[in-house]
């Protein structure tokens, strides 16, 4: 494509078939107004096809269902491709079951390092957020190392998403033009 941003979620449904949605977190946020408190729900949703595409988005609304729908639309508009490979020093099988190299992502005070693992290792990550996002991205074997307050679920989720997004920012020898 020409680098244009997709602005309609229905286009993503056609371009990337078999997208699965998973709710990562729902939290109650409140705003103080002169008339009192205004309560809303904030939802974080991840979408992926388990084959190299992942999207993460959030939405706020007065009802939980509306917040989840808004977050799903935002996640579809933020879909990115994840480069997969076998970058583990212990494996070397050449199949795309892990990451091709180590990547690091950051959001807020949370930093996450994704380290490629050997075949059969599984996902060594937190059950709540890390495994869900990595599984939706199609990564089967990976170590994670996290720094900072990972209990803040939105920052932790976006740190993992930013690390996965960086897999296509690094130019590898396979990308060199001959």
Image (spheres, rainbow, N blue to C red):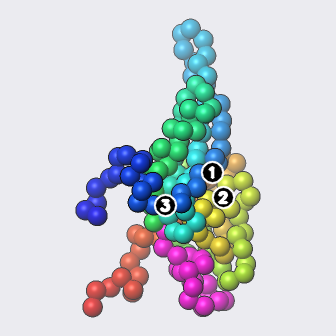
Q: What residue span does the magenta drawing correspond to?
A: 82-101
88 drawn magenta: yes
Disc 3, SS: loop
Frontmost residue, 52 versus 143: 52
How far apart marks 3 and 1 lie (CA) works out to: 16 Å
Q: In the drawing, what numbered circle is on residue 17?
A: 3
Local crowd size for mark 1, using a 10 Å CA cut-off: few (<14), some (14–19), many (≥20) = some
Q: Are marks 3 and 2 in contact (CB under 8 Å)?
A: no
Residue 139, compared with residue 159, is above or below; it is below
The residue that disc 1 covers is 22
Between disc 3 and disc 2, the foreground one is 3
Report the mark closest to the observer, 3 or 1. Answer: 3
x and y percentages locating residue 72 in the rendered image: 53, 45
Percent from the top left, x then y, of residue 115?
61, 74
Instruction: Specify which label sits upstream in the sequence, 1 or 2.
Output: 1
Relative depth, front residue between 93 and 161: 93
Q: Is residue 26 magenta?
A: no
**Circle 2 is placed at which residue position?**
132
- Of labels 3 and 1, earlier in sequence is 3
Q: Quadrant of residue 113?
A: bottom right
Dot 1: what SS? strand
Q: State yes or no: discs 1 and 2 in contact (Cβ < 8 Å).
A: yes
Q: Residues within 10 Å of mark 2 (few under 14, many from 20)?
A: many
> In this orientation, does residue 111 appear?
no
In this rendering, position of residue 140 left or right of residue 10: right
Dominant SS of magenta comes to loop
């Amino acid at each position: 494509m020409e680098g244009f941003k997709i602005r309609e979620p229905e286009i993503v449904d056609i371009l990337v078939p078999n997208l699965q949605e998973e709710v990562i977190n729902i939290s109650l946020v409140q705003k103080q107004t002169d008339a009192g408190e205004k309560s809303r729900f904030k939802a974080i949703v991840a979408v992926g096809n388990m084959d190299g595409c992942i999207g993460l988005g959030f939405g706020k609304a007065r009802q939980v269902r509306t917040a989840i729908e808004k977050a799903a639309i935002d996640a579809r508009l933020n879909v990115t491709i994840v480069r997969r490979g076998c970058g583990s020093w212990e494996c070397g099988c050449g199949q795309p079951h892990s990451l091709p190299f180590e990547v690091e992502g950051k959001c807020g005070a949370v930093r996450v390092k994704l380290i490629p693992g050997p075949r059969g290792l599984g996902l060594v990550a937190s059950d709540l957020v890390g495994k869900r996002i990595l599984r939706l991205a199609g990564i089967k074997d990976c170590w994670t190392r996290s720094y900072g307050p990972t209990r803040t679920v939105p920052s932790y989720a976006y740190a993992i998403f930013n690390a996965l997004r960086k897999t296509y920012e690094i130019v590898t020898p396979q990308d060199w033009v001959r």
